[in-house]
Image: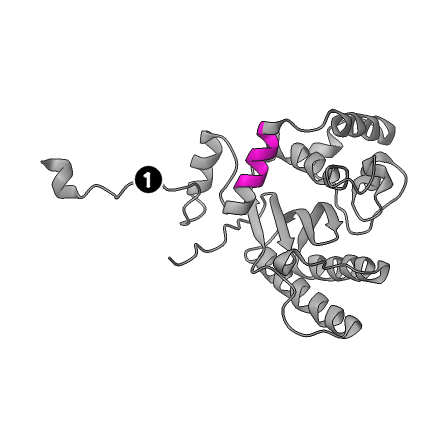
Amino acid sequence: MARLPRLTVPGYPHHVILRGNNRQDIFKTTDDYERMLDVLLQHSQAQQVEVHAYVLMPNHMHLLVTPQADQALPKMMQAVGRSYVRAFNQTHGRTGTLWEGRYRATLMQAQPHLLACMVYIDLHPVRAHLVDQPLDYRWSSHSQYVGPRSDRLVTPHALYWALGNTPFAREAAYAELVQSGVSGDQESALRDATLNAWALGDAAFMQQLEGQTTRRLTKAKPGRPVSAHKKSA
C-alpha cells in the first residue's frame, strides 16, 4: 500500500522523530551531537522553521517545531538528514544509510498538547535511564526553559511565554510541569499520533484543519467503504 503524503501545514506545531537504522547510534561522540545542533540551526533558519524543543538521544532524536512556510519542514528535514549523514560517514569511516526510513511526525493542536509534548521530550533521557534529572542531560532544550543557559536553536512558543510575567515565573512554572510529568494517556497519544502520522487534536480542531489539507487526518475506519448502490438499497 502506498504511503500517505506527510501531513504538514504551516503555522501549526509538529512533533518529529528521526531514528537510526536498526536502532544503531546516530551520535557516537560529543562532536556528533554538536554537529547535529549546528546543522539543525542552519537549516531551520534557512527554511523558516521554529524549533521549540529538542532532545538528541544516542540512536534517535525528537523535535517540536512550527514551520512558517509550505513544505518548510520536509525541506529542512531532508537537508538536515543529508548534511549530517555526509559528515557522520566521513568522520566515522562508513558508507550507506544512517536513518530508519523517513522521519515520523504529527501535527498537533497547541492547546493542550504542546507543553505536554515539551515535557515528554525533556523526560526522554530520564525514561532511558541516561540521567536522573532532565537538567543533567546536555543534549536537550530543557535548560533553555529552566534558566541555566540560552540556546540559539530554540524559539519559545507563545504558550511558554504565557506561563508567567517574568523569566523567573516562567522558568518555575515550566519546571513544575516537568516535575509533574505527563500522564500515560498523554504519552500514548503523542507517541501513537507521531508514529502513525495522524493529527492530534479535538473534533473542532480536526474540522478546522480539514479545510487546509486534502490529506486524511486520522486512521481510516475498518472495513470497506459502502457503495452508493448499497446505501440506496
Q: Is residue 67 visible?
A: no
How many other residues sit within 10 Å of disc 1, few (<14), some (14-19) or many (≥20)?
A: few
Q: Is residue 101 visible?
A: yes
The image quadrant where one finds the N terminus is: bottom left
Which residue occupies the extreme left position in the image? 233
Report the residue at 67% width, 29% height from top. 182
Of the pair 39 and 102, the residue shown nearer to us: 102
Identify the residue under disc 1: 222
Residue 37 % position (x, y): 78, 57
Magenta: main secondary structure: helix
Report the residue at 89% width, 43% height from top. 149
Q: Secondary structure at mark 1?
A: loop
Is 184 above or below relative to 19? above
Which residue occupies the extreme right position in the image? 148
Left or right of 3? Residue 20 is right
Residue 147 % position (x, y): 88, 36
Is 110 above or below relative to 2? above
Report the residue at 58% width, 37% height from top. 190
Left or right of 220? Residue 77 is right
Q: Quadrant of residue 126?
A: top right
Q: Is residue 137 magenta?
A: no
Q: Is residue 186 magenta?
A: yes
Report the residue at 90% width, 39% height from top. 148
Of the pair 74 and 20, the residue shown nearer to us: 20
> Which range of residues does the magenta coloring cover?
185-192
Residue 88 % position (x, y): 75, 68
Q: Amino acid at mark 1?
A: Pro
The image quadrant where one finds the C terminus is: top left
Is 18 above or below relative to 149? below
Colour setup of the view = one colour
